[in-house]
Image: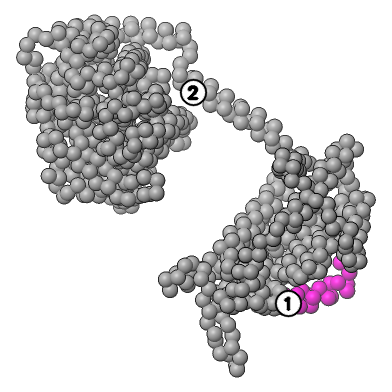
């Protein structure tokens, strides 16, 4: 399986998949997609990269420990619950902010950050499992 | 009127917990002198409780309440009457002295701060027990005393004996606490209130309730375990493993008296029945005799005191059990006297141990000239314990004899009391005379008087015992009679005299006690041998029984675990899937709601195509030669399902299904490579047959369940809501995503938390590996 072609293509493929996963994540509110699916795509990207180039390469590419990524995702999701509390609304009431940006309008919202949190948890937790399974003690 | 008002009592209750938080820091900076500063807190609490005394002597009671869990009738409420105030005074007052003593006793100990912290936690809990009005509050504090006493007994946790004693005390008293909880809740429902202040005015409601016996047994179990009544007495002497300040505090004046407190507290509503007046005096009387007899056997001064404490608690329970006003007055005076002299004697023994290096009564002697103040405290307290004038212990004995003599079965109870008190007399004499008088014995350390911190407590309590005897009339009126009234539920105020005013039977009984006591003291050494031989002949006691019960439980648990947790994955999976099959089929069989087999044939061509893919997939899995191949082929099923989602307009689901399938295959394959499995299936043909039928059952069950669901009338309320509002409220067109991150976002938080925890758990599991090749990888994993 670990052929020259695969090893050559894998980094580009993973990079594309990563990009795609972010795309899927961001468009999730209106089109098919979202944090969970995006996260799974990203994990697949890491898996391919890992099979081709080894676990240590993936760990280097991730910079942080996968579980730290998952934990920060959980934190982000929980924090995005809070802003409504300060406005005297029930927790998790979504807050929207329309930012004009280079001629278009970007909708920033707490559900978006919540979804990013979901994405990070999935990426972190699943890739942590996959990576630690992949590095065998032999 | 109280010093700072009734509400200030809440601060008095909070105080010890604050002190507990401060102790470690203060002990670090001030060393043992922190005790001086910390003792201020219980002293202030003492003053607060003291300020209630005049009002309570006039028959007033005080209440205050904070809301806690109003839904369940649980309030943080306090109730102060004669009973709770005297207890609170003893706890905070002796607590102040014990704080000082602990500072002296553990001077230079590295964990002094921790010790003081535990001690204050206990103090707070104990104060809570006696002033709690709400029964649930009472129970919470009650269990807190068990837990904190566990910490205190096990303070010296490097020693095995300490750990065992701590666990034993926790199991016995904590277990009794659970019985108590049931009893209190039952009493609360039967009596119509969870506030003791209201419950106590409910008259005969509890006594006439059909649940009276149940309430009685449960409450008495709680009280007997806590107050070390036979046959639960064994934990208390074992608890002497704790440092002496703990014994002086918990095992003389406070914790062990909680059970007695409870019985006294419940007396107005549970007492004065045939059951009460049979069970309590019998067990109390037996405890009294068992405690003193076992006490004679001991040579360790601290253990002698421990067993006499058991005996005294028995005496108190016996007296409370007579339900006779005078006997209960006797119990109250005795309880007061006992707290003073026993607290003092424990501190004396601790000081002797601390300064001479031993507390074995055969290895100490003639210490009086070296330790005059400690010796004085010992003599005064022992006189009180022996029941000699002019100390308060004498008054207690006079009144309690007067009480028991006139009750039903009075001869029996009086006999118990005389015999027990005579032995207690002899033991008191032993504790005071052996170490301090007679020929000088060479002790391990050269003895000298203890520091101020060490002697302040014992001499104060001893002198208080003397003073209480001298001013018994006003002490009785101000402190003791209000407590008796609270126990009886009706006002009681009889004047007390230090010396008997006429030749009552009690006086003769007292003289008989003293004469018998002197005889026992003279033959003490012989008796000790006789008791020791007798115990050796019996060879079994509740203490051993406790170990046996624990061993049986552990053996049972081991057997059960080994049966259920075989460690074989195949067994686990079979068990899981068998249960699933049962869950699927049992309701269908019981209700007869089988799904209708309709519309199966009317598939479109492309639907047949997907079904065909799935079937081919199954065939491939079943015929695959290697496990890894089978796992990869299993992915075909998932893709077939994903295709179905896609066709029925659920792109999100399909998308996710594709990804999940892919990743499951990858992860499963990785797991396979890690486990050293045979590449081929090694199941027997019988096992295979079982597994095949099981999987067919589960598959059929799931299909039939889904068919049943589809055949139910569709309720569109939710989907219409989401369709209607996902755009307008949540600004999103993708309903699935809007549900996930907005409408039902709280569920998602739960789910991602599960994902997170699963990740951590798997990581932990993978890192557990045989030691042989463990080190190479743990570095890399970081």
| Of B668 and B605, the residue lying toward us | B605
* Pointer 1 and pointer 2 on the same chain: no
Residue A4 part of the magenta-drawn span: yes
Seen at 17% across and 14% down, the residue is B402
Residue range highlighted in magenta: A1-18
Residue B757 falls in image quadrant: bottom right
Q: Secondary structure at mark 1?
A: helix
Seen at 63% across and 69% down, the residue is B720
Residue B546 numbered mark, or none: 2
Q: Position of residue B279 (x, y in %)?
A: 35, 17
Kindly report the secondary structure that dominates the magenta region of the rendered protein.
helix
Decide: is B736 above or below B534: below
Residue B24 numbered mark, or none: none
Q: Residues within 10 Å of mark 2 (few under 14, many from 20)?
A: some
Seen at 61% across and 91% down, the residue is A104
Position of the C terminus of chain B, as image quadrant, is bottom right
CA gap between label 1 and label 2 equals 66 Å
Residue A58 visible at all: no
Q: Position of residue B160 (x, y in %)?
A: 48, 31
Name the residue tied to disc 1.
Answer: A20
Q: Position of residue A134 (x, y in %)?
A: 76, 59
């Amino acid at each position: 399986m670990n052929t020259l072609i695969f090893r050559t293509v894998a980094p580009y493929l993973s990079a594309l998949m990563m990009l795609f996963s972010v795309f899927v994540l961001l468009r999730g509110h209106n089109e098919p997609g979202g944090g969970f699916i995006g996260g799974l795509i990203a994990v697949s990207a890491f898996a391919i990269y890992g099979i081709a180039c080894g676990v240590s390469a993936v760990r280097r590419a991730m910079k942080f420990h996968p579980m730290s990524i998952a934990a920060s995702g959980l934190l982000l999701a929980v924090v995005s619950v809070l802003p409504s509390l300060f406005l005297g609304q029930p927790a998790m009431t979504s807050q929207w902010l329309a930012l004009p940006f280079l001629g278009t309008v970007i909708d920033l919202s707490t559900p978006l950050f919540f979804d990013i949190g979901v994405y990070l948890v999935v990426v972190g937790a699943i890739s942590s499992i996959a990576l630690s399974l992949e590095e065998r003690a032999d | 009127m109280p010093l700072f008002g009734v509400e200030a009592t809440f601060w008095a209750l909070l105080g010890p917990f604050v002190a507990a938080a401060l102790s470690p820091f203060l002990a670090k900076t001030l060393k043992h002198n922190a005790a001086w500063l910390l003792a201020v807190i219980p002293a202030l609490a003492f003053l607060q409780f003291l300020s209630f005394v005049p009002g309570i002597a006039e028959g007033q009671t005080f209440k205050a309440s904070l809301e806690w869990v109003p839904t369940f009738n649980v309030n943080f409420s306090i109730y102060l009457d004669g009973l709770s105030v005297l207890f609170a005074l003893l706890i905070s007052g002796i607590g102040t002295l014990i704080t000082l003593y602990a500072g002296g006793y553990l001077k230079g100990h590295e964990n002094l701060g921790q010790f003081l912290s535990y001690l204050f936690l206990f103090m707070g809990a104990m104060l809570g027990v006696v002033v709690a009005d709400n029964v649930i509050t009472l129970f919470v504090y009650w269990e807190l005393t068990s837990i904190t006493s566990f910490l205190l007994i096990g303070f010296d946790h490097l020693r095995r004996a300490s750990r065992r004693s701590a666990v034993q005390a926790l199991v016995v008293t904590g277990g009794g606490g659970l019985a108590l909880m049931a009893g209190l809740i039952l009493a609360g429902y039967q009596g119509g209130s969870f506030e003791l202040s209201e419950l106590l005015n409910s008259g005969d409601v509890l006594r006439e309730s059909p649940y009276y016996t149940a309430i009685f047994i449960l409450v008495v179990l709680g009280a007997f375990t806590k107050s070390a009544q036979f046959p639960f007495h064994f934990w208390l002497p074992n608890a002497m493993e704790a440092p002496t300040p703990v014994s002086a505090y918990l095992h003389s004046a406070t914790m062990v008296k909680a059970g007695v407190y409870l019985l006294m507290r419940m007396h107005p509503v549970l007492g004065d029945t045939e059951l009460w007046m049979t069970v309590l005096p019998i067990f109390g009387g037996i405890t009294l005799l068992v405690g003193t007899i076992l006490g004679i056997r001991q040579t360790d001064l601290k253990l002698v005191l421990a067993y006499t404490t058991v005996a005294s608690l028995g005496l108190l329970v016996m007296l409370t059990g007579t339900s006779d006003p005078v006997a209960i007055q006797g119990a109250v005076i005795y309880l007061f006297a006992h707290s003073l002299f026993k607290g003092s004697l424990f501190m004396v023994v601790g000081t002797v141990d601390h300064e001479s290096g031993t507390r074995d009564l055969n290895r100490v002697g003639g210490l009086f000239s070296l330790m005059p103040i400690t010796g004085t405290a010992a003599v005064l307290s022992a006189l009180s314990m022996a029941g000699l004038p002019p100390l308060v212990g004498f008054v207690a004995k006079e009144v309690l004899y007067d009480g028991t003599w006139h009750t039903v079965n009075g001869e029996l109870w009086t006999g118990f009391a005389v015999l027990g008190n005579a032995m207690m007399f002899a033991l008191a004499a032993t504790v005071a005379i052996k170490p301090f008088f007679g020929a000088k014995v060479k002790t391990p350390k050269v003895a000298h008087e203890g520091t101020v911190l060490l002697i302040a407590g014992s001499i104060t309590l001893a002198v208080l015992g003397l003073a209480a005897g001298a001013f018994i009339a006003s002490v009785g009126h101000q402190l003791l009679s209000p407590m008796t009234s609270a126990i009886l539920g009706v006002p009681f105020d009889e004047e007390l005299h230090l010396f008997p005013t006429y030749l009552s039977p009690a006086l003769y009984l007292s003289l008989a006690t003293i004469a018998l006591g002197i005889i026992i003291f003279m033959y003490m050494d012989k008796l000790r041998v006789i008791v020791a031989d007798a115990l050796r002949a019996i060879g079994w006691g509740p203490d051993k029984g406790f170990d046996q019960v624990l061993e049986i439980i552990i053996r049972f648990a081991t057997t059960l675990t080994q049966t259920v947790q075989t460690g074989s994955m195949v067994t686990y999976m079979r068990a899981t899937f068998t249960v699933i099959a049962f869950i699927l089929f049992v309701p269908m069989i019981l209700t007869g709601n089988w799904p209708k087999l309709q519309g199966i044939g009317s598939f479109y061509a492309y639907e047949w195509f997907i079904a065909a893919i799935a079937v081919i997939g199954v065939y491939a899995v079943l015929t695959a030669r290697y496990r890894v191949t089978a796992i990869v082929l299993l992915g075909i099923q998932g893709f077939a399902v994903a295709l179905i989602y896609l066709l029925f307009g659920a792109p999100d689901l399909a998308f996710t299904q594709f990804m999940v399938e892919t990743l499951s295959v990858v992860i499963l394959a990785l797991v396979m490579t890690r486990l050293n499995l045979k590449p081929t299936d090694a199941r027997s043909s019988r096992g295979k047959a079982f597994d095949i039928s099981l999987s067919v059952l589960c598959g059929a069950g799931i299909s039939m369940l889904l068919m049943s669901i589809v055949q139910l009338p569709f309720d569109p309320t939710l989907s219409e809501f989401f369709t209607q509002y996902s755009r307008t409220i949540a600004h999103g067109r993708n309903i699935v995503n809007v549900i996930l991150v907005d409408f039902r976002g709280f569920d998602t938080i739960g789910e991602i938390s599960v994902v997170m925890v699963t990740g951590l758990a798997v990581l932990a599991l993978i890192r557990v590996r045989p030691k042989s090749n463990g080190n190479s990888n743990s570095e890399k994993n970081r």
